């Protein structure tokens, strides 16, 4: 019996999954081998796409045939299963083996006529042309998809997943990791965190979990490079990049453009010729104070004691002035800030109840006004998304012209983008509202305790939230509270606490 190898190939992974192509080829070729008295010594299989780089099965078959000269026959279903390009044809031809194209009832070997080889070469070129045309159609389809605002890749950024919506595979928000992405942008946009510090912050809030942690339905761990890619990705505010072009997407954004722009300013700060060590904000009071004597900026610096221990201190820049202020260590500033917050310990419990009642009234007003506006926007957005789906189906069915589709698509997508920005800003405003209300209450109850037990970056976040235009003079900080914290502070400084209701609680 003549020895032979069998080569099987599917042109896409879908064919392999469906399970009909490879088994059908195998049965056809093994039946042919049995009928024609071939001993099949090896089978080689490829299930890669037609244009993917390298075919492991084909390469392994070539190596095997070179190493085993006694095997001179290859059984394959047809021309386009064996060759992907003309180079493959030349490789097979140089081996001097006989190829049996079973479905085409053709045998190509050393004794094949020139006419037979010529016709076969044409078939090879036709197979190559089919692959090229298929590739062009795929690219055209992906481009059309991108023009329609649909991200044309199945590889989605963290925070999104693919789902079948109205028969189409579309990116939707992954609720499992949504909060991780939103918090990542919110924290980083403050400028208070380096990438490494941001990872620690997210980990402390249980949004990411170290690799050695027991399995839970969240992302395990994340690297600085991954966070940098996420921060720079416009996908999260509603656009996407495809083939180096920016497209307006129809997917649901996780953040608004304003927050994304703020994060870009922070992550691109290294583009300036500033040393990295001075650009990472790891000083608690950096940018918080100005000099109480001359009004110049207070700069932060890191020093090393003779013992080798590092410490931070603050000093007036004294630019073009004769300021007499002396440097002060961060530890001294810490003590004075904590001391200034002790005044909030004097607020009686009945006043806490008074503040709480005022916040509840404000919440009821919010629910009856701005929250209803948000609901109207969301209903309008849902209707427009349904119209987009119907518009896309009409285009596929050829019921509308390309010009009409593009005009309506732009009209609907522009309005959806506008609504997304409004809804997102409303959501951020609501988060700030709740955060403000909680902060007022916490400040009135335990400001000093919270500050003393906070981490350095949390202290900076806290002080930036409640202070503005504060000064540093004679080694003592003079805090200036933002509204409405200034009201709480002024009442805390006053020993006369009246529990009456004002006209505007």
Image (cartoon, rainbow, N blue to C red):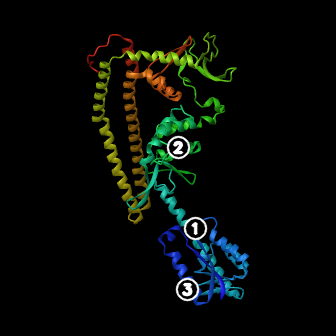
Residue 46 in view in this figure: yes
**Residue at 32 percent of width and 19 percent of height:** 349
Few, some or many C-alpha atoms within 10 Å of disc 1 (few <14, some 14-19, many ≥20)? some
**Residue at 63 percent of width and 71 percent of height:** 57
Q: Determine the image quadrant of residue 255.
A: top left
Q: What residue is pinned by disc 1?
A: 48
Count all numbered tags in the image, as a single digit: 3
Few, some or many C-alpha atoms within 10 Å of disc 3 (few <14, some 14-19, many ≥20)? few
Per the model, the C-alpha gap separating discs 2 and 3 is: 55 Å
Q: Nearer the viewer, residue 462 or 88?
A: 462
- From the viewer's perspective, is residue 292 above or below residue 259? above
> Which numbered mark, 1 or 3, is in the foreground of this view?
3
Q: Earlier in the sequence, mark 2 or mark 3?
A: 3
x%, y% of residue 232?
A: 55, 43
Q: Determine the image quadrant of residue 310.
A: top right
Per the model, the C-alpha gap separating discs 2 and 1 is: 35 Å
Q: Earlier in the sequence, mark 2 or mark 1?
A: 1
Residue at disc 3, secondary structure: helix
Few, some or many C-alpha atoms within 10 Å of disc 2 (few <14, some 14-19, many ≥20)? few
x%, y% of residue 466?
A: 44, 23
Residue 167 placement, left or right of 70: left
x%, y% of residue 14?
A: 50, 68
- From the viewer's perspective, is residue 28 above or below residue 380? below
x%, y% of residue 359?
A: 31, 27
Q: Nearer the viewer, residue 435 or 213?
A: 213
Q: What residue is pinned by disc 2?
A: 210
Q: Nearer the viewer, residue 303 or 285?
A: 303
Residue 290 placement, left or right of 83: left
Instruction: Indicate which disc residue 31 carries.
Output: 3
**Residue at 40 percent of width and 18 percent of height:** 486
Residue 111 placement, left or right of 160: right
Instruction: Indicate which disc residue 447 carries.
Output: none
């Amino acid at each position: 019996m003549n020895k032979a190898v069998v080569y099987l190939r599917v042109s896409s992974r879908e064919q392999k999954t469906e399970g009909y192509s490879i088994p059908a080829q195998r049965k056809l070729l093994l039946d042919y081998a049995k009928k024609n008295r071939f001993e099949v010594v090896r089978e080689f299989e490829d299930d890669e796409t037609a244009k993917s780089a390298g075919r492991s099965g084909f390469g392994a078959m070539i190596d095997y045939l070179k190493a085993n000269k006694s095997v001179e026959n290859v059984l394959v279903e047809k021309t386009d299963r064996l060759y992907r390009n003309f180079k493959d044809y030349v490789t097979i031809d140089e081996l001097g083996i006989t190829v049996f194209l079973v479905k085409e009832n053709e045998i190509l070997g050393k004794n094949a006529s020139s006419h037979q080889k010529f016709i076969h070469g044409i078939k090879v070129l036709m197979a190559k042309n089919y692959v090229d045309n298929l590739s062009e159609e795929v690219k055209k389809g992906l481009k059309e998809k991108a023009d329609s605002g649909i991200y044309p890749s199945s590889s989605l950024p963290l925070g999104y997943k693919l789902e079948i919506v109205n028969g189409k595979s579309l990116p939707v928000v992954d609720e499992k990791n949504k909060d991780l992405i939103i918090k990542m942008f919110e924290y980083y946009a403050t400028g208070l965190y380096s990438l490494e510090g941001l990872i620690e912050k997210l980990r402390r809030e249980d949004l990411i979990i170290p690799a050695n942690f027991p399995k839970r339905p969240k992302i395990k761990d994340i690297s600085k490079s991954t966070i940098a890619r996420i921060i720079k990705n416009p996908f999260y505010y509603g656009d996407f990049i495809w083939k180096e072009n920016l497209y307006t997407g129809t997917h649901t954004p996780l953040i608004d453009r304003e927050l994304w722009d703020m994060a870009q300013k922070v992550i691109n700060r290294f583009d300036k010729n500033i040393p990295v060590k001075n650009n990472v904000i790891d000083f608690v009071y950096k940018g918080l104070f100005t000099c109480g004597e001359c009004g110049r900026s207070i700069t932060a610096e890191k020093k090393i004691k003779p013992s080798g221990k590092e410490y931070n201190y603050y000093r007036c820049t004294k630019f073009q002035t004769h300021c007499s202020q002396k440097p002060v260590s961060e530890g001294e500033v810490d003590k004075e800030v904590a001391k200034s917050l002790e005044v909030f310990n004097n607020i009686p419990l009945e006043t806490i109840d008074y503040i709480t009642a005022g916040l509840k009234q404000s919440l009821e007003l919010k629910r009856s006004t701005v929250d209803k506006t948000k609901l109207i926007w969301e209903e309008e957005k849902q209707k427009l998304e349904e119209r987009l789906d119907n518009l896309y189906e009409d285009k596929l069915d050829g019921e509308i012209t390309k010009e009409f589709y593009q005009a309506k698509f732009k009209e609907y997508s522009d309005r959806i983008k506008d609504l997304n920005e409004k809804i997102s800003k409303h959501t951020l405003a609501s988060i700030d509202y709740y955060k403000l209300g909680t902060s007022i209450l916490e400040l009135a109850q335990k400001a000093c305790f919270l500050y003393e037990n906070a981490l350095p970056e949390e202290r900076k976040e806290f002080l930036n939230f409640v202070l503005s235009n504060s000064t540093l003079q004679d080694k003592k900080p003079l805090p200036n509270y933002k509204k409405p914290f200034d009201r709480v502070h002024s009442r805390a400084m006053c020993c006369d606490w009246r529990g009456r209701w004002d006209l505007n609680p």
